[in-house]
Image (cartoon, helix red, strand yellow):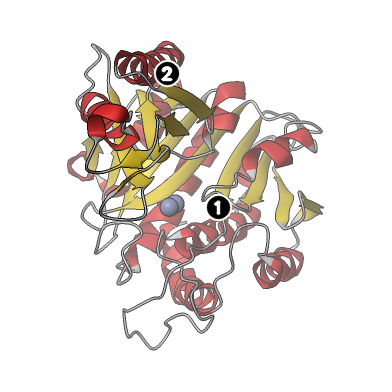
Amino acid sequence: MIQYIENLAPELIQLRRTLHQYPELGFQEFQTAKLIEERLERLGVEDIRRVAGTGVTGIVRGSCEGKTLLLRADIDALPLTETTGADYASRNAGTAHACGHDVHTAILLGVADTLLRYRAQFRGNVKLVFQPAEEALGGALPMIEQGVMEAPAPDAAAAYHVWDLPVGTVGIRAGGVTASPDHFRITLTGKGGHGAAPETCVNPIEIGARVATRLNNLKLDTPSVVSICSFLGGTGENIIPETCLLKGTARALDGDTRRRLYEVITATAEEVAASLGGTAVVDYRFLYPPCINDSGMVERFVSAANAVIGQENVIYQKKPDMTGDDFAYFAERVPSCYVKLGGAKTPLHAPNFDVDEACIKTGVAVMCRFALDFLA
Ligand SMILES: [Zn+2]
Ligand SMILES: [Zn+2]
């Protein structure tokens, strides 16, 4: 199987470069979805379907009835201008695959190809899920609402994200692996007036400054992060405004902490505003849940990875990171593992983001081994 993947790798790199040249934003992945469908059809994948607009699913059946493993790749790009200067750089102005979803897509197409070839070696099904709109909008939930977790219902799920770890390695951990990336806006209202007479006013800028300081320094006893990322208010040098607006993000790795952040942020804003004679209105948006890796699945994945790339290349990550991923919706429903794939040359979302394409081969080989073992 390793030799088959070796031989397939140049074609997968070519596929990745084509995807990279024509990146598309969430729920607009029309060309991308078409490319995926055509490729799956050519391979002979069964039951190819469009789900949630630009999502694509398909089934690779093994030798006989058995369990179903869902493998997910996200397919969307980001609204930013690529600066890599690569000859396969984005040709869609203002849009770039700066989060490696082109790589995830190429890997899953390679996994489909390889598993079809080796279908005699496993039972049951591999359900391929090419998911739109991971960035911000969230394509996982609409896909689930439209039946991705049925007929056949998956018993487990797995996904990769490329990461700035050395190429040839994977990073993994049990438990919380991505955070709930919730958003909030706090509108603070005071009493406007002349900058020369602050004693006659309630200055919302002062309230905002205190709220921002308190929230940026908020420490709970479980992992969490709060960042105020936008502070908007006022017009002139000598006018105390009526209102100002703070925008921020609050992240946690478990549901309890997530709820506590909501409570503390709301209470802090209201208390600080009231203490200075103003008011606070908090508009809180719960986005993706935290993604929790199942320890049994992690164990299985680690043993597959050990067999393919060697124990020394399987990095057990002590600390989770606080980014979000809507793969979490799959992980809420079935035992799952979300794995970091080494190979990113820069931080994610950087305008010069690129990967060492050798990670594609590693990704395909480890995922295929894992699927064969899980469906043995
Ligand atoms: Zn991203
Ligand atoms: Zn991403």
322 on left or right of 300: left
Amino acid type at image mark 2: Thr
Amino acid type at image mark 1: Asp
- Circle 1 packing at 10 Å, graded few (<14), some (14-19), many (20+), is many
Real-space Cα distance between discs 1 and 2?
A: 33 Å
Look at mark 1 in the image and give the residue it sits on: 74
Q: Residue at x 61, y 56 (%)?
A: 112
Judge whether 250 appears above or below 349 on screen: above
Look at mark 2 in the image and give the residue it sits on: 266
Q: Label 1 CB, ligand 2: below 8 Å? A: yes
Judge whether 196 appears above or below 167 on screen: above
| Residue 275: quarter of image | top left
Residue 277 at what x, y percent from top left?
A: 35, 18
Q: Do the residues labelled 1 and 2 touch (CB within 8 Å)?
A: no
* Residue toward you, 278 or 298: 278
Q: Which residue is drawn at 43% across and 84% down?
A: 88
Q: Which of marks 1 and 2 is in front?
A: 2
Residue 153 at what x, y percent from top left?
A: 74, 29
| Sooner in the amino-acid sequence: mark 1 or mark 2 | 1
Judge whether 58 appears above or below 214 on screen: below
Q: Residue at x 49, y 65 (%)?
A: 102
